[in-house]
Amino acid sequence: MTEPSSETFPGTLVGVERLREHVRERAKQGGLPAKAVYNLCLAIDEIATNVVLYGYEKAGRTGSLRIGTSLDEETFTVTLDDEGVAFDPSRFVPPTPEELARRLEDRTIGGLGLFLAFRGVDTLRYDVRSGVNRHTFSVKRQPHGSTPLA
Amino acid sequence: MAFKVSSQVTGDVVSMTLVGELDASSAGAFKSEIDKAVGQSPRSLVLELKDLTFMASAGLRVLIYAKQKLGSGVSLYAVAPQDGIVSTLRMTGFDKSVYIVDQPPPPTPDTGRRT
C-alpha cells in the first residue's frame, strides 16, 4: 500500500464524515496502530470541519475537500486541499495548562478543536498556493514491522 | 456510523446512551437531548458511551454546555468510554469534571452525598 491516492469529497459536514471514513481505511491499510488511526482521524475531522463551517459556509462559498494519502517506510502522510477562506492554524494559540485544568462550568467553548488537531499527529503543516489551502498531516509509523491492532 | 442518542429517567438520574460517531453533524441531536435532561433537574447525568466510536470537539462543547446548564451540583459520568475518547477527555482536562467509570454509579439513595 505504498501508492499515493487521492479522493475528492463535497465541502459539507456529510463530506467530512465520508472523508474521515476514507482516511480511517487508508490508515488501517497502512498499518498504523488503532490509537494513531483514531487520533489522525480526529485531527483531520477538526480541520476539515473548520474548513466547511468557516472557510466555506460562513463565507458563502462552496467547494470540495480533496484528500491525498501516501505512505513511506517512516511516515503516513495525509494532505487536505480546499479553496475556502485562508486560515493558518499555526496562528492558533493553544489553551494553557491552567485553562485545561478549569472546571467545565468555568470554561469558554472555543479552541479545543485545533488543540486536538495538533495533538493528534506528529506534524501538521499549512500552506496556501494559488488560492488552494493545503493542510499536511504526518504520523510516524512504528519503528519495526509490529502493527498492534488492539 | 450514524449517531443515535436516547435517554432514560430513573428517579433523579438521567441516563443517556450515545451510539456511533459524535461530530459537528450530530452534536445538535446530543445538545437537544441535554436540553431535555435539564428540564428533568437531575442530580446526575450518566452517559453510556460503550458504543460511541468517535467524539470530536463538537461533542466536548456539548459537555461544557451540559455542565453549565445543569450546574455544579450535578455529577456527570462517562461510563465505559472507548480508548480514543478517554484519551480526548484526559488530554483536554475534562476528566477533572466528568467521572470516567466502568459501570454506572449505584442508584440515587447511595449517591445523595451533596449538600
Image: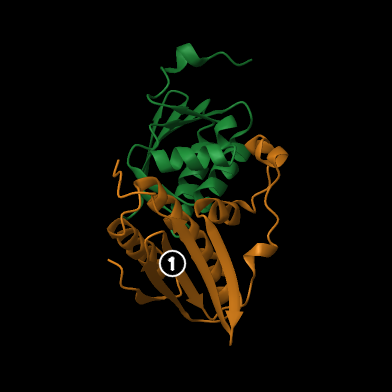
Chain colours: A orange, B green
- Of residue A43 and residue B79, the one placed in the foreground of this image is A43
Closest to the observer, A34 or B80: A34
Amino acid type at circle 1 is Val
Left or right placement of residue B44 versus residue B68 in this view? left
Which of the 4 quarters of the picture holds residue B101?
Answer: top left
Instruction: Tell me if I can see residue B19 in this picture.
Output: no
Q: Classify mark 1: helix, strand or loop.
A: strand
Residue B51 visible in the current orientation = yes
Q: Residue at x 29, y 44 (%)?
A: A149
Residue found at x 48% / y 52%:
B56
Q: Residue at x 64, y 50 (%)?
A: A109
Residue nearer the viewer, A118 or A110: A118
Q: Is residue B89 above or below residue A134?
A: above
- Tell me the crowding category of disc 1: few under 14, some 14 to 19, or many 20 or more residues within 10 angstroms, Cα based: many
Image location (x, y in percent) of residue A9: 38, 75
Which residue corresponds to the image point at 27% horizontal and 66% vertical from the top-left? A1
| Quarter holding residue B48 | top left
Q: Which residue is mark 1?
A: A78
Where's residue B43, x and y in %? 53, 25
Circle 1 marks a residue in which chain?
A
